[in-house]
Amino acid sequence: MVDIRMAAPVTVDRAAEREAAFRRLMTDELSRVHGLAMAVLGSAADAEDAVHDAAIVAWRRFASLREIDRFAPWFDRILVNVCRDRLRSQRRSRVVDVSPTSLESSGAATTPEPDDGRALGERQAIDLALRRLNPDQRVVLALRYGADLTVPAIAARLGIPEGTVKSRLHHALDALRAAIAAEERG
Amino acid sequence: MTPPMEPDQAAPHLEDALRSAYAAQAASPTDELRQRVATVPGSVRPDRPAWRRPWFPVAAAAAAVVAVVFGQWLRLRSAASTTPGGVAVPPAYDPAHPSSGLVTPTGITFNAIGDDASRVATWISAIIVIALLLAVIRPLFRGRPESADDRGQKRPAGRRRVAVTLALMLLLAFVATAARNVAPVPLRPGSVSASGLGASEARSDGIDPNIVRTLSGNVDVGVSSCPSVRMFCGPRSVYAVAPGQPLTYVMSVRNSWPVGIRLLGRWRESTARTDATEPNGSTPTGLSLLRDPDYVDARPESTKPFFPVNLAPGEEVTLVVTEVARDCADPAKAVPARSDSGDFTIPTVQFVYEAFGIEGIATVSLSPEVTVPSNCP
């Protein structure tokens, strides 16, 4: 497989070439961006819908992408915005999905790893605590610890200064600790 | 109920626990998602900027032509500087009372003249032109708004947008200022001048603006065309009129610009003096036009109230300036002959004109000079 990120910048002009390039890029990035959406949304169904919505937005704006080797961060930014909108929409509708089915679909139960019971309990506590955070906090935590991005890369994907990223990370971790404590109190 | 976490363990291991939790969520995209994503390019039309669409340049050009033609039509559809045969002339007016022709420039583009309908229509055409200009410069603002910059912080497009906007504003300000300072006044004295109602004496000791202009204000006795030793001699009309009595004089103005302009009237707040050395003993009350442009007669029955006049390049219009003697006018006061150049002001009349929808003031020298004997301070 050709490493697209190492290739020289390509100017996509013709429609057919553009479409082929988009399909190829999406195929290559699909697993990664799906994982990113999963980390942010915590739900497989929501993540698939978000990736599909982001793909539509990205295709509409694909002509504005001048350097095709920047597709990954460009698409991540679109995907993060879509995920954040979905999280906000869920908060507005006050629907908190904590059903066992949701937890299963999140992967915690469907992909069990050889682990002891306390580790599994920690993950479930974190899953529930993450749902108490606001969308911005969930996004920044998912990008940092789920996608394992650096602070500058997160800043680029969110379009905010690095200092703001650090601040959000700090407050998100504090909020997560508080949420975990609240979960433990039951 | 989830197993409780030890509080002292939660803080130090929180980040690791987060990584572990996110890793446990990892799942591969389903075939359904792959299928849905693969169909996107075939089912969704990509966006195209309006300015890149084929119809845009055609529409822009058509709109520009319509706007220009419409604007010119608005400018030229008003009455010409002469009264067409067969058209009823306005009723006679009294030059002793304020009448048409005195205007105050608003300085606001496209807001000077015309009825409400034409004013609104002109504004609309102006907005179309401005919108087209914005569309033309829009490509300058194109950056990479959708691309992520690994350096974070602000996007290049934002900085360029600010820079281009500031540069354009500075350029426009510079061009406007330069054009205003460099462009010559569009109105010049025309070929017709005469005394009118109330004139009692013609002299030759007036200030001739043409000679003054030739000398650029320098004293040069050798240029004098007068029989005496005085300089800058020109015609001078003395109007020995009583307070409240009207006086008129005739002058013509010519459009010296290569484009058409519209003469809106005399500047109401003008402080220009029609007398080179004496205070003005009269107050402007208006302008009027000749009913028959080939017959120069400043009597009220031979004139009609002023209305805005379009002047083609090189065209001139004859105006009858009407004024009323102030309370300090003294017809019995003897006007002394000028014995030397002394301090003087070139006699002028200031008019308001409009060009390209923008109003301006033009100072036109007056000859013969108008003197109203008075005791004004």
Image (spheres, coloured by chain):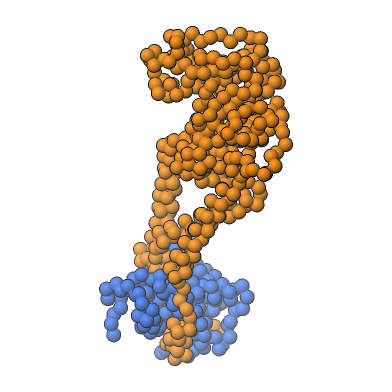
Image quadrant for the C terminus of chain B?
Answer: top right
Q: Residue at x 58, y 34 (%)?
A: B294
Q: Is residue A45 above or below residue B129?
A: below
Q: Is residue A148 visible?
A: no
Disc count in the image? 0
Q: Residue at x 62, y 43 (%)?
A: B84
Q: Residue at x 54, y 14 (%)?
A: B203
Q: Colour of chain A?
A: blue
User: Which of B128/B66 is in front?
Assistant: B66
Left or right: where does residue B328 sit relative to residue B72? right
x, y percent for residue A47: 49, 82
User: Which of A61/A150 is in front?
Assistant: A61
Residue B146 position by quadrant: bottom left
Image quadrant for the N terminus of chain B?
Answer: bottom right
User: Which of A85/A41 is in front?
Assistant: A85
Q: Is residue A91 above or below residue B86?
A: below
Q: Residue at x 40, y 52 (%)?
A: B163
x, y percent for residue A69: 32, 73
Q: Is residue B72 visible?
A: yes
Q: Colour of chain B?
A: orange
Q: Is residue B76 above or below residue B195?
A: below
User: Which of B109/B1 is in front?
Assistant: B109
x, y percent for residue B12: 42, 71
